[in-house]
Amino acid sequence: MIPSVLRLTIEKIVYPGERLAHWEGRTVFSDEGLPGEIVEAVVVKDAKSHIEARTVRIVEPSPLRIEPRCGHFRACGAYQVLPYIEQVSLKSAQLREMLAETAGIEPGKISFAAAPEPWHYRNRVRFRVVWTGRTAALAYRAPGSETSFVETGTCHLVSAGMSGLLEACRAIIESAGIRTIVEVEARESRATGERLLCFHRKSPARPGDVDPFLTGLPPRFNLKGIVASRPAGRGVQTSVEWGREHIEETIGGRTFRIGAASFFQVNPVMLEKVQDEIRGFAAIAGTGRLADLYCGIGTFGIALADRFREVAGVESGPENIAFLKANLEANKIGNFRIHEGRSEEWTDLILEKGVDLAVVDPPRKGLEPAVVRSLSAHPAAALAYLSCNPATLVRDLRRLLDGYRVFSIRGYDFFPQTPHIETLACLVKR
């Protein structure tokens, strides 16, 4: 019988941030601890293949352990206890191990780029509003739970201005007793300092609900708009409660309008580095056609449009499409054709005509099988695959490498102080 509390020696940290140990020959995964540390962990689940646990005490700490800045650091994967240079080394090793062992890629083709700013880098954050009596707090979801939350205090992954805005919102929600707001989201432009608030409501706003924010948020927060969303039938209804529905960001000399629900990378400094690498990689391809699949609001297609005769962008999200059109107009892009729909619906038609460079930036689940089949049947001269999940990247590469060879793979630390890894795989047609 397994005791309720295990004493473990942490052996390594495996992606995505799980602490690996063994107890009486069985594999144990816990949520905190550095390699070499002895910890006590409470058993959470006894699965057939492993034991899941939660670390409750560090018995013998590692000499590498440092004090975390955020009190809620566990909610972000418990990486803050590791110096940033060690985080980079860890993520680089994880990426090389996953790609080499599972996809057979030579480690020498894999590199890793650290973030120049390991704190205050996020341009977007979303918190749950949690009530205890008449006191409101902002909280992250507890790891692996949809119903448990961890109060945040100050979040050092966003700017001081964003933290101030969120705290001011929390105080207004508490003092005015606005319980219709379930979650608070903020977006920020690094280029202009503009900020946008999004209130996720469980029911329509009552008359006057927005007034305390208009009177209570000082001009220094540079707030440009308040947008609200709430459930409506099987979907979500969005409305502008005050101001405008977007902020403007500048990346690589291009202007992007970003709405409350638009997909846009949370680390603009690292995004610009990825854009630069893709632009350099594009130099080995022709200058005819670019296919920008999963194109969102045009982050890559617009950045590269001046290098190609024609750009074919595919996007399915209505809000993304609306802002994509606005961004094409704002940047005076005339060679970009929008294909509205899912990528798997368009890839065959686009790729069979011949493509010099294809750029794919899919969600965490990776490429749809139909997209992989299209890329394999009609390979582009060059393929740039930006992935936010190394596990699905490895899966997709195993299917793609019959028709492509690896030019380079670089991990980018878009998310310091967390386990997440962004990876750019640059492939060329065999």
Image (cartoon, helix red, strand yellow):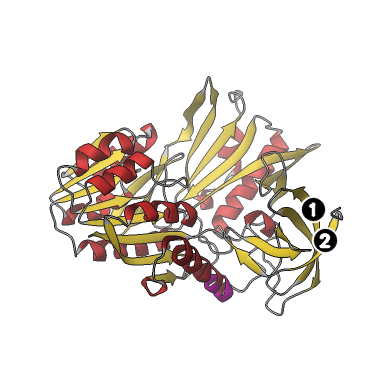
- Residue at screen point 14% across, 43% down: 353
Residue type (three-letter) at the residue carrying disc 1: Val
> Label 2 belongs to which residue?
6
From the image, give the main secondary structure of the stretch colored magenta.
helix
Q: Secondary structure at mark 2?
A: strand
Marking on residue 65: none
Judge from the rendering whether residue 385 lies leftward or rightward of residue 309; answer left or right: right
Q: Quadrant of residue 315?
A: top left
Q: Amino acid at mark 2?
A: Leu
Q: Residue at x 33, y 39 (%)?
A: 370
| Badge 2 density bin: few <14, some 14–19, many ≥20, Cα 10 Å | some
Q: Is residue 413 in sight in this rendering?
A: no
- Above or below, 297 against 104 in this view is above
Q: Are marks 1 and 2 in contact (CB under 8 Å)?
A: yes
Near-viewer residue (318 or 378): 378
Q: In what element is the residue under mark 1?
A: strand
**Foreground residue among 189 and 425:** 425
Horizontal and vertical percent position of residue 271? 39, 59
Q: Position of residue 237 (x, y in %)?
A: 49, 26
Asked if residue 162 lies left or right of residue 274, the reply is: right
The Cα atoms of the two marked residues, 1 and 2, are separated by: 7 Å
Query: Which quarter of the figure has residue 419?
Result: bottom right
Residue 226: in magenta span:
no
Where, by quadrant of the figure, is residue 32 drawn? bottom right
Instruction: Please determine whether, in this image, residue 203 is positioned above or below residue 3.
Output: above
Who comes first in sequence, dot 1 or dot 2? 2
Q: Which residues are magenta?
A: 85-89
Name the image quarter holding the C terminus.
Answer: bottom left
Q: Tell whether 284 sits left or right of 154.
A: left
For disc 1, the marked residue is 43
Q: Is residue 86 magenta?
A: yes
**Residue 356 on image: x %, y %:** 18, 54
